[in-house]
Image (spheres, rainbow, N blue to C red):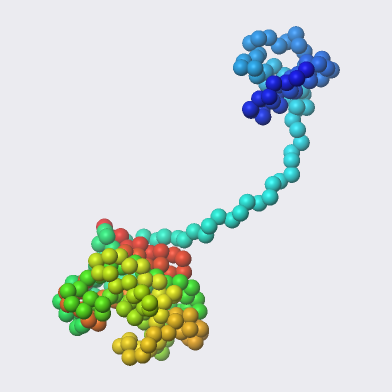
Amino acid sequence: MQLRKLVDNKLVTVLAGATVVALIGAGAGYSAGLTTSADIKDQTIKMKALRPGTVDKLKGQTGPAGPAGPAGPAGSGQTVVSVLGQNHPWDATNASVSLTPDGVEFGPYPDAGATGGSICWKGMNGQPLSAVKSISYDIRYRATADGAFAAPYLRLFLANNHDIIFSANTQSPDPDLDEGEFNDYVVTQGSVRYDDDPGNNPDSPWATVKAAHAAEIIADDICITQGFSNGDNADALLRSVSVNGTTYVFRGN
């Protein structure tokens, strides 16, 4: 007898098992006299038409476990920051910095060389600089004069009054100073200065500075600042900051 090829593997198993039972008769625990047309629908024998012992005999052995699949891509966490303050991980240094539904607003500062504001995070205080694996921030800024020098910058404060500063306008070869557009500044892939806020000396690669000061302790926050540099009528909107794989999204009520 030749069985017709079926698409459903389960259907093949049941039909083939039923055929074998029909050939060997009652010895396999099946009685042909008990099966009627009501037990067969769409070429499938209902399982209730078979005795429990027969159903068990139709079950095959469990095969060996297949190889493990490839690992999925590493995900990054996301934390929504909906409040700022001294008793929270994120805080603003003055009232010119505020949390809005679109992000953290800075300014405007009519004279950004004399005024400004910062948002600071204390989440890594007490840890060595070597613990910093990645830092980036997504921000938009504008200014009516000296725009290239009005881009918001990041400072990482270390113990004993040392600091590391990342300036967008000193990045090479592409400083990404497009005003009015969001720019994602990746600090840990760029260049920075150690104890040189005014920018009197050239930048050094982040990896070089980190290696030279790996044991120094982060003691007084990581801050992003607009102002206290250059530019007229400067403002900024900070959308998010990512540190070591966690993205902090600023979204006020």
For residue 124, say whether it is visible.
no
Q: Residue at (78%, 20%) from the top-left corner?
A: 20
State the residue at coordinates (40%, 71%): 186
Can you say whether 20 is above or below 35 in the image? Answer: below
- Determine the residue located farthest toward the front in the rendered image: 173
Please say whether residue 198 is visible from this viewpoint: yes
Outermost residue to the left: 110
The quadrant of the rendering that contains the C terminus is bottom left
Which of the 4 quarters of the picture holds residue 96? Answer: bottom left
Where on the picture, by quarter, is residue 93? bottom left
Q: In x, y percent, where is residue 47?
A: 68, 21
The picture places residue 173, in percent across and down from the top left corner, at: 38, 77
What residue is rendered at 69% in x and 16% in y?
49
**Residue at left offset 48%, top offset 73%:** 133
Residue 176 position, x and y percent, is 32, 72
Q: Quadrant of the N terminus?
A: top right
